[in-house]
């Protein structure tokens, strides 16, 4: 099961799982994109693909996804759905920030709880959780987004240790900038970015082998540069980086509603 399968990293993971011959449950809001992907993968790889169009920001959505997959033999949850905002926290609308916590954190916990129980009972399974390079320190101009990813990172690290004796693998995937729909929705400008296919491949390869994978050369380089530094200094440096990625907001004279394309 792949959430966030209509675009970007989730779509790339779904494609690579289909290439490996796995049946799929594809979850996101944009039903038409999911249906087109399901039709394409079914035709090319002779797999079965089911589409579940839900808004994971709605508290009832995860339960509905669980109910719709009750009769299926699910062995992997890739909880990829998520989005970011950018700009000063106090300048954007609160409801968008709270929705981001619901999608990036609440739905991830909800789905992980259900599927990890199922996987533990069957003594096999895997969880892929989407962290970020931003998860490892506070990041000015992406304060709440970085915090949601810190939550997922910490959650995944602990789950890996809890679940590995039950035969369940957990990996946190922490890419740097990735070329996807994320950039426009978060109203960021990325000058260099990894391709979603690379992130997907390295993330799938890390499942069962690593606690945290940093897919893409850029994320490895940035992490290696930041790791030796004190956390406060890392925050300041990431604030400068994020300042560059959101400079256009000042150029455009954007004062309100930052971060929402
Ligand atoms: N791109 C980056 O630079 C980057 C870096 C580090 C980590 N990440 C993380 O990687 C994950 C995937 O991002 P991406 O780069 O692939 O972005 P993307 O291309 O924008 O894809 C995001 C996916 O999440 C789904 N989604 C968003 N809100 C949803 C909601 N309320 N309910 C259900 N599905 C929802 C979207 O589908 P619908 O719009 O159809 O609902 C889409 O399939 C996110 O968790 C993100 O935080 C991204």
Image (cartoon, helix red, strand yellow):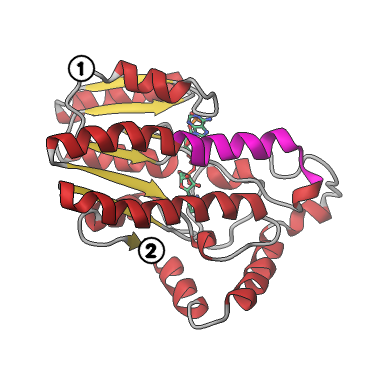
Q: Which of the pair 155/204 is nearer the observer?
A: 155
Taking the spot 48% from the left edge, 61% from the top edge, the residue there is 176
Residue range in magenta is 91-107
Residue 73 spot, x, y in % from top left: 17, 26
| Main secondary-structure element of the magenta-colored stretch | helix
208 relative to 56 in the view: left or right: left
The answer to whether residue 85 is above or below residue 232 is above
Q: Quadrant of the C terminus?
A: top right
Q: Residue at x 24, y 49 (%)?
A: 163
For disc 1, the neighbor class at 10 Å (few under 14, some 14 to 19, many from 20) is few
The furthest residue to the bottom: 228
Could you say where residue 192 lies in the image, as x and y percent from the top left? 53, 63
Q: Tell me, yes or no, whether the highlighted magenta stretch contains residue 165.
A: no
User: Is residue 201 in view?
Assistant: no
C-alpha gap between disc 1 and disc 2: 34 Å
List the residue tagged with mark 1.
Answer: 71
**Going 17% across and 52% down the picture, which residue do you hit?**
165
Q: Quadrant of the N terminus?
A: top left
Near-viewer residue (56 or 222)? 56
> For residue 50, what is the image quadrant?
top left
Neighbourhood count class around disc 2 (C-alpha, 10 Å): few under 14, some 14–19, many 20 upward? many
Pair 1/2: label in front: 1
- Percent x, y of residue 143: 66, 55
Q: Which mark is residue 214?
A: 2
Q: Is residue 97 magenta?
A: yes
Earlier along the polypeptide chain: callout 1 or callout 2?
Answer: 1
Asked if residue 255 lies left or right of residue 181, the reply is right
């Amino acid at each position: 099961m792949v959430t966030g399968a209509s675009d970007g990293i989730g779509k790339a993971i779904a494609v690579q799982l289909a290439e490996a011959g796995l049946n799929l449950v594809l979850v996101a809001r944009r039903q038409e994109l999911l249906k087109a992907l399901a039709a394409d993968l079914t035709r090319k790889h002779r797999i079965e693909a089911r589409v579940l169009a839900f808004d994971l920001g709605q508290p009832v959505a995860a339960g509905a996804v669980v109910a719709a997959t009750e009769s299926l033999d699910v062995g992997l949850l890739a909880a990829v759905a998520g989005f970011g905002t950018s700009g000063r926290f106090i300048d954007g609308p609160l409801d968008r920030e709270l929705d981001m916590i619901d999608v990036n954190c609440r739905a991830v916990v909800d789905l992980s709880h259900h599927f990890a129980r199922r996987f533990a009972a069957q003594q096999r399974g895997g969880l892929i959780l989407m962290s970020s390079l931003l998860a490892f320190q506070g990041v000015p101009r992406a304060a709440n987004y970085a915090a949601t990813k810190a939550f997922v990172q910490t959650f995944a690290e602990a789950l890996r240790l809890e679940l590995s004796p039950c035969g369940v693998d957990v990996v946190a995937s922490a890419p740097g900038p990735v070329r996807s729909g994320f950039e426009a929705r978060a109203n960021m400008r990325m000058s260099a970015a990894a391709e979603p296919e690379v992130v997907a491949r390295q993330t799938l390869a890390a499942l069962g082998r690593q606690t945290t994978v940093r897919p893409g050369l850029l994320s490895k380089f940035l992490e290696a540069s930041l790791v030796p530094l004190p956390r406060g200094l890392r925050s300041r440096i990431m604030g400068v980086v994020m300042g560059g990625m959101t400079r256009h907001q000042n150029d455009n004279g954007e004062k309100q509603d930052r971060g929402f394309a």
